[in-house]
Amino acid sequence: MLLENVYIWYNGPYGDNMKNNREIMKRYMYYNLKDRENFKYEEDQMAFTQGAYHAAIFFYKNDLIEEVITKGDVTVFYLYYQFTTYAHGKMMFEAMLTCLEEFKKQKEKRVLLCCSGGLTSAFFKAQMDDFLKLNHKHCHIEASAAEDVPMLKEHYDLILVAPQMRYLVKHLQKELPESTVEAIDPQVFATYDCARLYERIQAFYRGKNS
């Protein structure tokens, strides 16, 4: 299971069967969900979507409850506990909703890699995607041929140009003033050094948010 920015708690066991209160808890959860998309409810599972996030609540035997929030194939929230009282369940459920709202406020990092024909940058993008998943990081990275960049409709915070295309940096800066355009370090690009490229991306966002 991939975990990123995971909020995780475990409580229990307490031993008392809280079946009646658990049914009340299910109703409370249902009526306190906002902006439900693709809401599904079964006896032992409740699932819904809010924007890019998918949330699910599972009800198991022995009054165990599992709350999960995922974004794509990355788990960003995981909470597993034994339901004891209505107040206890309410506190746990509200923790899930609070984190979900915080996740939705976070602006997605959008980065574009570009080279002469788009093939090398597409391969680097694939390497970066694997690196991000393996290290539980999240960043939306795309690849493109340099000549196609001005025509792209999507907005990218950071556009990283292959070192052999460095001469295009000033041109792209004029074409796309809302984006930061930089050339990739030759050693990073030539060796597909994902760790160093990610460090550069992180440094950009730290500077942008400071």
Image (tube, rainbow, N blue to C red):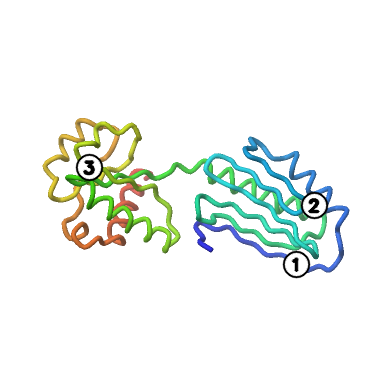
The image quarter in which residue 75 lies: bottom right
- The type of residue carrying mark 2 is Ala
Between 118 and 207, the residue placed more toward the observer is: 118
The residue mark sitting in front, 1 or 3, is: 3
The first of marks 2 and 1 along the sequence is 1
Residue at x 20% of width, y 41% of height: 146
Pick the front one: 131 or 196: 131
Tag 2 residue: 87
Tag 3 residue: 145
Q: CA distance from mark 1 to mark 3?
A: 54 Å
Q: Residue at x 82, y 52 (%)?
A: 86
Name which residue type carries label 3.
Ala
Image spot of residue 79 (x, y percent): 65, 59
From the image, state whether disc 3 or disc 2 is nearer to you: 3
The amino acid marked with disc number 1 is Gly
Q: Secondary structure at mark 2?
A: helix
Q: Secondary structure at mark 3?
A: strand
Q: Residue at x 62, y 48 (%)?
A: 55
Q: Residue at x 39, y 47 (%)?
A: 140
Question: Where 95 falls versus 195 (above or below)?
Answer: above
Q: Quick one: label 1, few (<14), some, or many (20+) residues within 10 Å?
A: few
Disc 2 residue crowd, few under 14, some 14–19, many 20+, Cα 10 Å = few
- SS of the residue under disc 1: loop
Locate the C terminus by quadrant.
Answer: top left
Of the pair 101 and 143, the residue shown nearer to us: 143
Query: Which badge, 3 or 2, is on the more N-terminal residue?
Result: 2
Residue named by callout 1: 12
Q: Is residue 100 above or below residue 153?
A: below
Q: CA distance from mark 2 to mark 1?
A: 15 Å
The answer to whether marks 2 and 1 mark residues whose Cβ atoms lie closer than 8 Å is no
Q: Position of residue 104 (x, y in %)?
A: 53, 42
Horizontal relation, residue 167 to residue 194: left or right: left
